[in-house]
Amino acid sequence: MIILGKGTVITRDADRPIIYDGAVAIDGTQIVDIGTYDELCKTYANAEIIDAHGGLIMPGFINAHHHIYSALARGLSLPGPAPTNFGEILERLWFYLDNKLTAPDVKASALLTYLGCIENGVTTIFDHHASYGEVHNSLSVIADVAKQFGVRSCLCYEVSDRNGVDQMKAAVAENVRFGKEAKQDPSRLAAMMGLHASFTLSPETLDYVKAHNEDKLGYHVHVAEGPEDVADSKEKYGMTPVRRLVESGILGPKSIAGHCVHVTDQDVELLKESQAKVVHNPESNMGNALGTTDILKLLGAGITVGLGTDGYTNDMLESYKVANCLVKHEQHKPYVGWGEVPHMLFENNRKMANEFFDTTVGILKKGAAADVIVLDYAAPTPLDENNINGHLLFGANGMYVVTTISDGVPRMIDRKLQGIDKAEVMNEVLATSKGLWKRLNP
């Protein structure tokens, strides 16, 4: 048994949102008690103590849309002119990269990403994968690293027509195969059917996907991320990508629609009726000059909107900060975003995760998964349940995380990784990335 304390416990539980001089008691993979440090130490006198040094004790963060496969592109420079639009970014960078990725590259990408998750207090992710250099078993390569680092992972493989029918079918098969594997470990692994976007998916492919989705996995798909997706759908099918995907039976209660930047009022109504979840990725959208998801309109319609990073970072507090500034900038209203963005990060991400994993995450209470982090943050002003989000917004980032426990196992204590040799991991990642870059720049 472990007692993590003492510190200010931010539970994200409305019944008991904050506990001063608090602690969390962990037995096995679950939280068994929560209360003041002194109370828990008396009740569980033989427990191992992990010192929180008076910091903030919180649930681990959840990233609702990630791209592990992009990790080895950090610092990468490719020959040729710089892309001038989103289509060129995809063709010249991401499609080019994922066509070269083999199993060792996928493993190295996962090692780097999951290491970053632990160091930034992220204990659950939804990932959207592509490695057309080696499709079969690629999701299991990621899952093995996920279990090694203790990060709950909902994985899918990106189905697309861009590499022909055989590769499309291989991608579908990988989703189906991994879906069965994930069922064997439902508290740690989950699966979805990954789809790239409407403009790389023919009607025949959508029919094939649905016919072979034998376990009725939910769909994780990029929707109206760039204007190209909208233009293609209107030209070929006479409708927006949202309408096309809804009418095709793709978007529904078990689906995640990434981005939704270029959506109409009618699209918003369709998303609401479909009960699909939407994930906002502010930094990626800004970095690709794609526009801004109207999160206020989506949230106002009653749609569950979560927060992701799209592979841009592993730091969810960084994404929180950017999303907060971006909605104010776009709306020209300084009073918006204060409540909506943290609701996305702390409430909606938790809601999404708890629909896919066979355990309760994103909250500190008895019976919930023991995914707990500590931030080295000493409040310089009064801190309570009403202003904690303001403290996080202006006072912390992911690297304030000093201790990460997931599934009841300490992964990092006082910034020291536990059972993980960082130098060894980074040496493997660097060696693999050098080989990949040579293949990308022959």
Image (cartoon, rainbow, N blue to C red):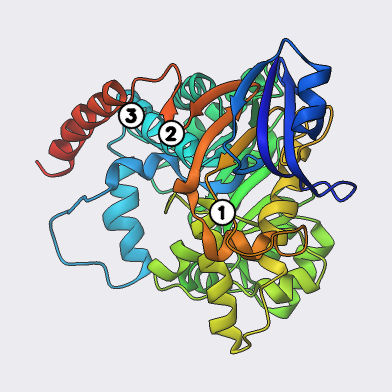
Eye-nearest disc, 2 or 3 = 2
Label 1 secondary element: loop
Q: Kindly identify the amino acid type of the residue bearing the numbered disc 3.
A: Ala
Q: What's the distance in space between the residues labelled 1 and 3, CA to CA?
A: 21 Å
* Residue 337 relative to residue 413: left or right: right
Q: Nearer the viewer, residue 178 or 302?
A: 302
Q: Are marks 2 and 3 in contact (CB under 8 Å)?
A: no
Question: Looking at the picture, how far across and down is residue 260, in whole percent?
Answer: 60, 66
* Residue 172 relative to residue 134: left or right: right
Label 3 secondary element: helix
Number of marks present in the image shown: 3
Res 177 visible = no
Question: Looking at the picture, how far across and down is residue 185, in whole percent?
Answer: 67, 18
Name the residue tied to disc 1. Answer: 308
Q: Nearer the viewer, residue 264 or 51?
A: 51
Q: Residues within 10 Å of mark 1 (few under 14, many from 20)?
A: many
* Residue 268 relative to residue 408: left or right: right
Q: Residue at 60% x, 37% y: name it.
A: 373
The numbered disc on residue 415 is: 2
Q: What's the distance in space between the residues labelled 2 and 1, CA to CA?
A: 24 Å
Q: Is residue 335 above or below residue 241?
A: below
Eye-nearest disc, 2 or 1 = 2
Question: Looking at the picture, how far across and down is residue 21, in whole percent?
Answer: 72, 40
Q: Based on the displayed image, in which of its 4 quarters is residue 56 positioned? A: top right
Label 2 secondary element: loop
Name the residue tied to disc 3. Answer: 108
